[in-house]
Image (cartoon, coloured by chain):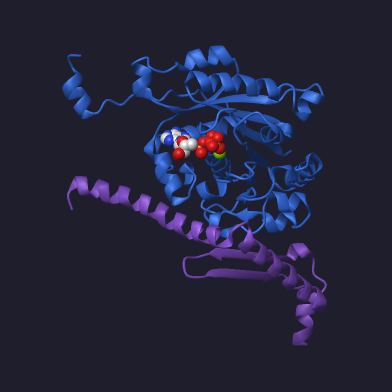
Amino acid sequence: MSFLSNIFARRQQSSSVAKDRLQILLAHERGAGEAGESDLIRQLHKEIMEVIARHVAVDQDKVQIKVDRGSGCSMLEIDVEVPQELSGKRGS
Amino acid sequence: MAKVLVVTSGKGGVGKTTSTAALGAALAQSGQNVVVVDFDVGLRNLDLVMGAERRVVFDLINVVQGDARLSQALIRDKRCETLSILPASQTRDKDALTSEGVARVMDELREKFDWVICDSPAGIERGAQLAMYHADMAVIVTNPEVSSVRDSDRIIGLLDSKTQKAERGEKVDKHLLLTRYDPARAARKEMLSVEDVLEILSIPLLGIVPESEDVLKSSNVGAPVTLAAPTSLPARAYFEAARRLSGEKLEVSVPVEKRGFFDWLFKRDA
Ligand SMILES: Nc1ncnc2c1ncn2[C@@H]1O[C@H](COP(=O)(O)OP(=O)(O)OP(=O)(O)O)[C@@H](O)[C@H]1O
Ligand SMILES: [Mg+2]
């Protein structure tokens, strides 16, 4: 690859990353309309919290719900920090 | 003690969001705990510049209104673990940001972080005033051209009158960050010089960030320029500015025009 095409190839890279990122973001924003998708995530968040609260008394701050929006699907990652006594009880 | 810093300008498009991301990352890269807060409600972009846009669930307004805990809205940067972002809302009503709500969130942020860096929206209206209200320090982002300098002057006026510090008879610690500085045009005297801007605004200079394609490339890939291109000229300017914010006394370096081979070839006699 020549020196010049090398430079152009690199330039291509950052702009095509930009395009991919925008396409993913806009697909979610357009599909969602006015905050539709985030409302779904918030609803899930609320109900998951309620289910957890039914079984263990955990601090809201100890439950982390994260999203990663992708092109085909989105990942929902739920981290629940269960208190020591509870996680121990099951084993013994 | 936590420091609240507002990055503001009056004029739009001068580099506030770019500078918030770069300064925030530079401070975090030095090991301090930093949160960058997007106050540009309705037009959030800090998440995009920082590469966190796919991970936003809750935003500043959700926290202000009590719909989410602060810890649930904060997004930790994947490349730098001392850096977090609190996104702005994209769609909601700007008036949802109440002064009391913002005050509560700022108090909570002060407890968790060493630096709280607020990315102000353009303009001098309520949004810009909310972003600056709690500031201990301000970075005034200015481009070396007349309308930007004029707007910076108005913002300096607001910092001296409409902030909590001003109400208490204290002063916000103000710093000038000259961005999109083009050494070639400066050499041709087509731009206001650094001295001119400093003389007019008379606040201390935090740094001079050159116009550079590295800034655009970094925003393409969703990373502050200090993380994406740490050895580039703009990144160096931001690293130095961050050290000055932390209290180091460093001389500000003025980016000089690097004459390319072709300039040299054709302009030798000019
Ligand atoms: N040093 C620089 N060199 C080249 N381009 C730059 C530089 N700084 C900022 N830019 C570009 O200028 C544009 C505006 O920057 P940015 O979004 O940071 O401004 P802003 O002040 O936050 O704008 P707004 O008022 O709309 O919020 C962006 O396209 C950004 O990439
Ligand atoms: Mg901005």
Q: Determine whether, in the image, residue A1 is placed left or right of residue A28.
A: left
The x, y position of residue B75, in whole percent, is 62, 55
> Residue B184, how many percent across, how many down?
34, 23
Rendered colour, chain A: purple
Q: Quadrant of the N terminus of chain B?
A: top right
Residue located 73% across and 42% down the image? B95
Q: Quadrant of residue B262?
A: top left
Q: Quadrant of residue B70?
A: bottom right
Q: Is residue B52 above or below residue B193?
A: below
In the image, is residue B205 above or below residue A44? above
Q: Is residue B256 visible?
A: no
Q: Does residue B225 lie above or below A77 as drawn?
A: above
> For the view shown, which residue lies furthest in the bottom direction?
A92
Residue under the point 80% across and 79% down: A55
Q: Quadrant of the C terminus of chain B?
A: top left
Residue drawn at (69%, 70%) of the image: A44
Residue A15 appearing in the image: yes
* Residue shown at 83% from the left, 72% from the top: A57
x, y percent for residue B238: 50, 35
Chain B hue? blue
The front one of B230 and B75 is: B75
The number of numbered discs placed on residues in the rendered structure image is: 0
